[in-house]
Image (cartoon, coloured by chain):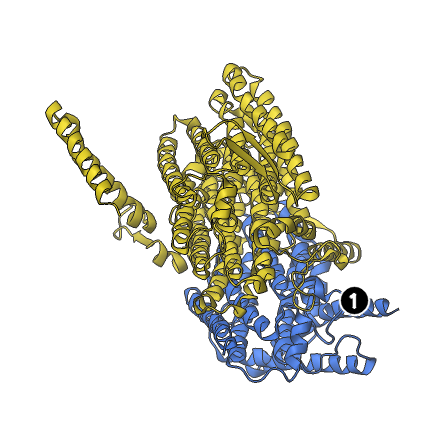
Chain colours: A blue, B yellow
Amino acid sequence: MAVIREFAFQCAEMLLVLLLSPLLTGFVRKVKSRLLRRQGPPLLQPYRDLIRLTRKEVVLADGASWLFRVIPYLIFAGTWVAASLVPTFRSGLLFSWSADLIAIIALLGSVRFFLALAGLDVGTSFGGIGSSREVMIASLAEPAMLMIVFTLALIAGSTQLSTMAAHMASSAVGLRVSLGLGLLALIMVAIAENARIPIDNPATHLELTMVHEAMVLEYSGRHLALIDLSSELKLLLYVSLIGCLFTPWGIAGPGADAAATAIGLVCYVGKLAVGGVLLAVFETVIAKMRVFRVPAFLGAALMLGLLATLLLFVSRSL
Amino acid sequence: MTATYTLYGVAALLLLAPVAIAFGRSPRASSIVYGACLIVTLVLGLLALIHLLEHSDQSSTVVLPFGLPWLGSHFRVDALASFFLIVVNLGGAGASLFALGYGQHEHAPHRVLPFYPVYIAAMNLVVLADDAFTFLVSWEFMSLSSWALVISHHEIKENLRAGYVYLMMASFGTLALLLGFGLLAGADGNYAFAAIRDAHPSSGLAALVLILVLVGAGSKAGLVPLHAWLPLAHPAAPSHVSALMSGVMTKVAVYGFVRIVFDLLGPPAWWWSIVVLALGAITAVMGVLYALMQNDLKRVLAYSTIENIGIIFAAFGLALAFKAQGSAFAFASALALTAGLLHVFNHSLFKSLLFFGAGAVLNATGERDMDRLGGLIHRMPQTAFVFLVGCVAISALPPLNGFVSEWLTFQAILLSPQLPSWGLKILVPAGGAILALSAALAAACFVRAFGLTFLGRPRSPAASSAAETDSNSLAAMYVLAACCLLAGILPGFLIDALAPVTHVLIGANMPHQAGVEWLSIVPIAESRSSYNGLLVFVFVVMSGSLATFIIHRLASDKLRRGPAWDCGYPDPNPATQYSASSFAQPIRRVYGTMIFSAREIGEMPAPGSTAPARLTVEIRDLIWDALYAPIAVGITYATEKLNALQFLTIRQYLSLVFAALVILLLMLALWP
């Protein structure tokens, strides 16, 4: 009986992240528009876009291979699984131990690997430019992310997200310099990973500075819908990750009752809203960077992460 | 008994050589030789597997009356040797199966066939050897037989140069090992490993031996800066031999390092780990950066071997660091060592697979240059699929096997803050960052390798008229790809199989994994970290299928073909696609300006001129310029000066001999 209940919670989490992710993207767009004194699209517009795209036929480029048609499903599946492994409203879910934080990051790495291959498949110059820039950005973002994981894992004594969230919520963690550096670095990496301003512009086309949009330029119909949904899931994943590691308040522990779970749910939605507003404000006040300024931005994130880890290694002995 | 049977197998391989010499030119010789090699290596691999699983607590020894007269030739199979025998023979079996198809296209089979079985036999003998003399003779045998295979296509001038550099570096490495064993055996010449193990060298001597072993085994494995021969020699050989050299011979070198440093040298000093870890980390990142700058597919793979050797050595460095702290850290040392050994096994699988794929491409198109390939996924769909599996595995991406060993290495790094030494405290996290950097760059490197070779539009007529490779080659690649998947989703069984190996070397092993729920792997405790490749794989497959089903059922499954969009400006010329060097341009610009002093020189013609604009990219190999070129200049200078000694009179020669005798006697008299 308990297993069935836990299984139901796991399924609920998978559905929740899937259903909430377009809303988060719509919310960020809406807040951004309001900040620019525009009306902006309705909150539910991303859902409508997805439904419209899935109903349309796919126009496949002549040179596209079988891999090009498989990749959207792979990307969606990988991102969805990764997003459902991050604790949202309840920690210690049935399958939460099947991948720790390092494995979740690596799973997103697999997703990016296939996305970069998709950019090269049709053999257009736009796809190539997107892929080559994406792997360059990833080569800096991934080590930075891993340094952040090291920092947090050393503080929490674990790479298991549920354990880390529980440890962060406990009083054992004081204010630490390393935590601050880690949070800053994680936000920088999250911005780069989600192709947001100032690294990339999610709302642009026909611009030589675009990265993510250039890779998926040849996609249409249901394939494009899946890729868009994956990007929305990825944004949700990073906001949930920051939320569960740095603001772990309200997350219901394993075996919590219905009331605690409901509180967890409300807290989670609240965290998403705060995260969305902050992202929209940040994107509004900053300008897009040149592509070759990105290494400096991510290099700073890497150095912050390394500094945070080194501080911990050094302070542990004292 | 295992040692005896393995020696029978080795003898059978050695006997194949004269057969191949006699009938090498006959058309059926290659099927017979490769078929026999396949059977023998399979049997040897099974024997070693049975030994590792059933009799790992005992060792099987044989003494043969060869070699040094007072010593004989000692052979022994223990847990460590049986693990490496599995790696050698699994790689050998894969290569032989691949060569059953690939070898039919060889235009000079009589140059390959006699050396191939000898080469596999020599690698087996290195792992079997239980005294320094047998070890060195087998080692040199392995070097020379592989050298003969490297220059088998001697009509290509580059291959001759590769063979020359290889021969130089191999002799240099063996010299270092010879000196190392000489120091270990002492003045009495106790060359048997059992005697060396009991001798316990002094700390200064052990440090000297460590350096010599790093030079000797490290140059064979491809540690930076002793790697220069590897990217020349590995691609020059026929592809199945390249796979053996990259996938297996480098592992035999790793075996030499593990055998001497973990087994024979006694308890390590704490600073050894710093040397090994730093060398490993530098090797990993340099190897993959070199790989990203290459346009030749096989050379990319060779440089990526260097990267993986770096990862293996970094794991061994961590294991040494923990081992030096005594029994309180034995579990951490076992974790790091298991990670390294697992990566040895994994790398032998996917690197062989990738070299087979490159061989199939080479056979179908005659091209190794990625700028002249492209679009092969349409004409060689099965090769493309297995090559893709290899690329995902080597990029350390879940759920395949490369990720498991990388994940275990990271878990070992996370245990290191408890280490007392300050040098390690700072070096280990930096090493972790460098390993993560090299993993991300490896993914970039294999997106580039796969994307340019198999995706896009064909860049040459040869690439557009290629055909799928033969069924034997495909079978070999499918088997290895299946192994990569199985090792990725069920790593617990491999970790358990490695337990006796770490037990022999460290005295501890990782917790038993096969009994853990859902077959996940839990290196320390479940609250700390766990990973379940099987579940991740099942979840991804299930949610992917679910998405496909729902969308195709409830929405639309219609499809229309049309010209590529490309923002409205598609160009039919395949030269407008991204090329190998343009794909690497962002990474070259970020990392290469410092490491390779890379420069881009653009020449624009004067206004009105019809001359084309030119872009030249300059990349310099700073290690070659700073280390190898001065040595080559010095040797040339010395030989020119010494050349005068060739033309002396008999009186001068006699006085030279007399002077040498006097000096030697003086030294003997003055020696304390």
User: Residue at position x 54%, y 74% from top?
Assistant: A187
Q: Secondary structure at mark 1?
A: helix
Looking at the picture, tell me which residue is in the foreground, B506 or B144. B506
**Where is residue B26 drawn, in percent x and y?**
54, 15
Q: Which residue is labeled 1 in the image?
A: A11
- Side of B477 where B422 appears, left or right: left
User: Residue at position x 60%, y 56% from top?
Assistant: A110
Looking at the picture, tell me which residue is in the foreground, B530 or B287. B530
Looking at the picture, tell me which residue is in the foreground, B218 or A206. B218
Looking at the picture, tell me which residue is in the foreground, A94 or B577. A94
**Where is residue B336 drawn, in percent x and y?**
56, 57
Amino acid identity at mark 1: Cys
Count of residue discs: 1
Q: Is residue A100 visible?
A: yes
- Side of B41 where B641 appears, left or right: left
User: Residue at position x 55%, y 36% from top?
Assistant: B128
**Where is residue B246 drawn, in percent x and y?**
50, 40
Please give the chain letter of the residue carrying mark 1.
A
**Where is residue B41 drawn, in percent x and y?**
61, 31
- With respect to residue B485, does B460 lie above or below? above
- With respect to residue A121, does A214 lie above or below? below
Q: Residues within 10 Å of mark 1 (few under 14, many from 20)?
A: some
- With respect to residue B547, does B659 lie above or below? above
Q: Is residue A42 visible?
A: no
In which quadrant of the rendered image does the N terminus of chain B lie? Answer: top right
